[in-house]
Image (cartoon, rainbow, N blue to C red):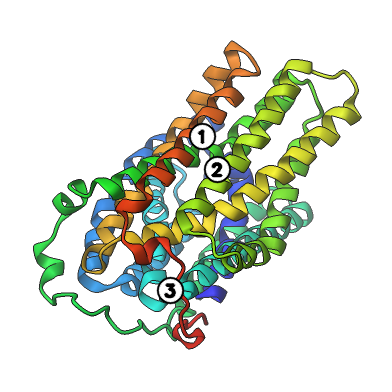
């Protein structure tokens, strides 16, 4: 599973950093058309999440992962041929639906193949390898495009399809651990999304994640605009910030997660601490927005230091928050629960561009003050809901290392 995550990361890295340019050259359509289609299909693709959740509960996470990998592979094989607007919209919707459903199915797979602290280890490893793979994929695509020119985007699309195919094949050795005691065989069919809607503690967990997901979107959406439009700094700082974030996530992810587990922190409190580290970095950015130093080196040094704080917050928050959701979901309906949880990520990504650009237009300090508030509220919700969640989801239980099949 870890190798599959690394290969999947390479595939994502080959197109995500320059999405609009990638699809413009692959399809031949204009930038405005490509942007509009990707926005609409991305929102429409969220409709696949409830279906994917139900499919996971019925068939298991691994078969659903196979389908999603194959769908994405077929999509990228078809992109170079999708040069009319209807064809591009159809392929983009197919791929977007698979992309939106993928994280929920992957989280459910973690729940199937690991127990206790092994879930935390596996989640940290997956995140680290995905970030490392994304960096490698972006570098590979950059090299190919640099050598072969714009025409190489087509080869990158085909290479992307190959990575998703390989990632699917790497899932074959995975075997689920034994079903938790008390899980009724017919429960999967009897329970539905009404059970999720009635679970207020889990919905509180999902609401907290939505607020923290806005913080994650800040790096890709708000940072570039803030640097260029408000601070009038060099655009190269954006790339540097991304590079620092990606490298730290890949290199230090498992180390930080291990230290958090070793300290015995409850998952709710570790996730809350990560959110407060987000808030600390946003507070620094609010100060920077107020001061607006003229010296370029001051802007650069301050931004890079705050990106490090932000990234540490991400490394502390992510493994604990994700495994908390996996472990809080009842096993018979885990797919539906995690599909609901994943909606918080998708909704935050959809809202972030318009929200952040609107706040930045008011004043450069406003978006950071807003994010400080959302991070603090999220931390408060996590602490408040702690007692209402299943104990095994909050406390990191030690598990035999051989329960994880991470091939």
Q: Which residue is mark 2?
A: 275
Residue shown at the point (77%, 31%) measured from the top left: 235
Q: Position of residue 160 (x, y in %)?
A: 55, 62
As drawn, 382 above or below 282: below
The kind of secondary structure element at disc 3 is loop
Local packing at callout 2 (Cα closer than 10 Å; few below 14, some 14-19, many 20+) is many
Camera sees residue 293: yes
The kind of secondary structure element at disc 1 is helix
In terms of sequence position, does the residue under pointer 2 or pointer 1 come before the other?
2
Residue shown at the point (47%, 44%) measured from the top left: 83
Give 12 or 127, whichever is nearer the viewer: 127
Tell me how far mark 2 sits from mark 1, CA to CA: 7 Å
Local packing at callout 3 (Cα closer than 10 Å; few below 14, some 14-19, many 20+) is many
Q: Which residue is mark 3?
A: 116
Tell me how far mark 3 sits from mark 1, CA to CA: 28 Å
Q: Position of residue 114 (x, y in %)?
A: 42, 77
As drawn, 282 above or below 174: above
| In the displayed structure image, the side of residue 291 where residue 252 appears, left or right | left
Q: Quadrant of residue 180?
A: bottom left
In terms of sequence position, does the residue under pointer 3 or pointer 1 come before the other?
3
Q: Position of residue 85 (x, y in %)?
A: 41, 38
In terms of sequence position, does the residue under pointer 2 or pointer 3 come before the other?
3
Camera sees residue 346: no
As drawn, 17 above or below 247: above
Q: Position of residue 150 (x, y in %)?
A: 68, 47
Q: Are marks 2 and 1 in contact (CB under 8 Å)?
A: yes
Residue shown at the point (70%, 28%) measured from the top left: 285
Tell me how far mark 2 sits from mark 3, CA to CA: 23 Å
């Amino acid at each position: 599973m870890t190798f599959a995550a690394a290969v999947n990361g390479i595939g994502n890295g080959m197109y995500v950093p320059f999405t609009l340019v990638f699809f413009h050259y692959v399809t031949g359509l204009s930038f405005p058309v490509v942007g509009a289609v990707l926005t609409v299909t991305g929102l429409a693709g969220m409709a696949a999440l409830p279906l994917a959740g139900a499919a996971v509960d019925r068939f298991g996470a691994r078969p659903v992962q196979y389908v999603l990998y194959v769908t994405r592979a077929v999509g990228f094989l078809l992109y170079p041929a999708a040069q009319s607007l209807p064809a591009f919209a159809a392929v983009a919707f197919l791929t977007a639906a698979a992309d939106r459903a993928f994280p929920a199915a992957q989280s459910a797979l973690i729940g199937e193949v690991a127990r206790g602290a092994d879930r935390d280890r596996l989640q940290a490893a997956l995140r680290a390898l995905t970030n490392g793979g994304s960096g490698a994929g972006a570098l590979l695509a950059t090299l190919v495009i640099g050598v072969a020119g714009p025409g190489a985007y087509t080869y990158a699309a085909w290479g992307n399809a190959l990575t998703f195919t390989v990632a699917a094949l790497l899932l074959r050795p995975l075997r689920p651990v034994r079903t938790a005691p008390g899980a009724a065989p017919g429960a999967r069919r009897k329970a539905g999304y009404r059970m999720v809607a009635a679970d207020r503690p889990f919905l509180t967990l999902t609401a907290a994640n939505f607020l923290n997901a806005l913080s994650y979107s800040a790096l890709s959406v708000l940072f570039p605009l803030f640097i260029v439009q408000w601070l009038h700094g060099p655009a190269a700082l954006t790339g540097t910030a991304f590079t620092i974030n990606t490298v730290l996530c890949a290199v230090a992810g498992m180390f930080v997660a291990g230290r958090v587990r070793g300290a015995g922190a409850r998952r709710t409190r570790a996730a809350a601490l990560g959110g407060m580290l987000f808030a600390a970095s946003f507070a620094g950015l609010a100060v920077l927005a107020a001061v607006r130093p003229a010296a370029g080196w001051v802007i650069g040094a301050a931004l890079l230091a705050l990106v490090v704080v932000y990234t540490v917050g991400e490394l502390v928050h992510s493994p604990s928050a994700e495994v908390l959701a996996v472990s809080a979901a009842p096993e018979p309906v885990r797919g539906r629960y995690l599909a609901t949880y994943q909606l918080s990520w998708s909704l935050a990504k959809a809202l972030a561009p318009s929200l952040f650009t609107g706040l930045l237009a008011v004043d450069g300090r406003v978006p950071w003050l807003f994010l400080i508030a959302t991070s603090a509220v999220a931390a408060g919700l996590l602490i408040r809901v702690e007692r209402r969640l299943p104990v095994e989801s909050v406390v990191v239980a030690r598990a035999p290392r051989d329960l994880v099949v991470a091939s």
